[in-house]
Image: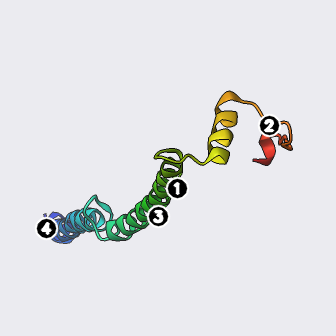
């Protein structure tokens, strides 16, 4: 009888502390690693930086396209650009052009 009381007196606090420790570990893990945890701030900052770089590249491409469109439209048309675009779309080259063929591994 005395042994059971001592065993209960030792095992119940150990069991209680281990359950509380497991619950604490669970909540701390989710507070750090979850969707709204502490680590997500750095991840979101990295994603924002990548998206801003992507936006800058797309804005630059848009400006290039707008410049080409401005040269092709209007009262005067840049004949060189028009000829280059026609050759590119038709898959042809001019008689004075030099063609360099690259294999797909070097691109």
N-term mark: 4 or 3 = 4
Residue at the (50%, 50%) spot, across then down: 65
Give the number of the mark in front: 3 or 2.
2
The answer to whether mark 1 and mark 4 are in CB contact below 8 A is no
- Helix, strand or loop under label 2: loop
Mark 2 Cα shell of 10 Å, populated few (<14), some (14-19), many (≥20): few
The answer to whether mark 3 and mark 2 are in CB contact below 8 A is no
Give the total of numbered labels: 4
N-term mark: 3 or 2 = 3
Mark 1 Cα shell of 10 Å, populated few (<14), some (14-19), many (≥20): few
Q: Which mark is residue 5?
A: 4
- Helix, strand or loop under label 4: helix
The answer to which of 90 and 41 lies nearer the viewer is 90
- Helix, strand or loop under label 3: helix
Residue 57 in the figure: left or right of residue 89: left
State how far apart marks 4 and 2 are (Cα): 100 Å
The answer to which of 63 and 70 lies nearer the viewer is 70
N-term mark: 1 or 4 = 4
* Residue named by callout 3: 53
Q: Which mark is residue 64?
A: 1
Residue at the (22%, 68%) spot, across then down: 24
To which quarter of the image does residue 95 belong? Answer: top right
To which quarter of the image does residue 85 belong? Answer: top right
State how far apart marks 3 and 1 are (Cα): 17 Å
Residue 101 in the figure: left or right of residue 23: right
Residue 8 in the figure: left or right of residue 50: left
* Residue named by callout 2: 94
| Residue at the extreme front of the image, as rendered | 75
């Amino acid at each position: 009888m005395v042994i059971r009381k001592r065993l209960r007196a030792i095992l119940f606090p150990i069991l209680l502390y281990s359950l509380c420790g497991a619950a604490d570990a669970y909540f701390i893990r989710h507070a750090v690693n979850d969707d709204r945890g502490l680590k997500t701030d750095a991840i979101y900052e990295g994603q924002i930086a990548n998206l801003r770089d992507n936006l800058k590249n797309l804005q630059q491409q848009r400006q290039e396209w707008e410049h080409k469109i401005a040269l092709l439209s209007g009262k005067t048309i840049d004949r060189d650009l028009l000829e280059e675009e026609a050759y590119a779309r038709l898959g042809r080259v001019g008689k004075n052009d030099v063609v360099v063929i690259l294999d797909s591994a070097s691109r």
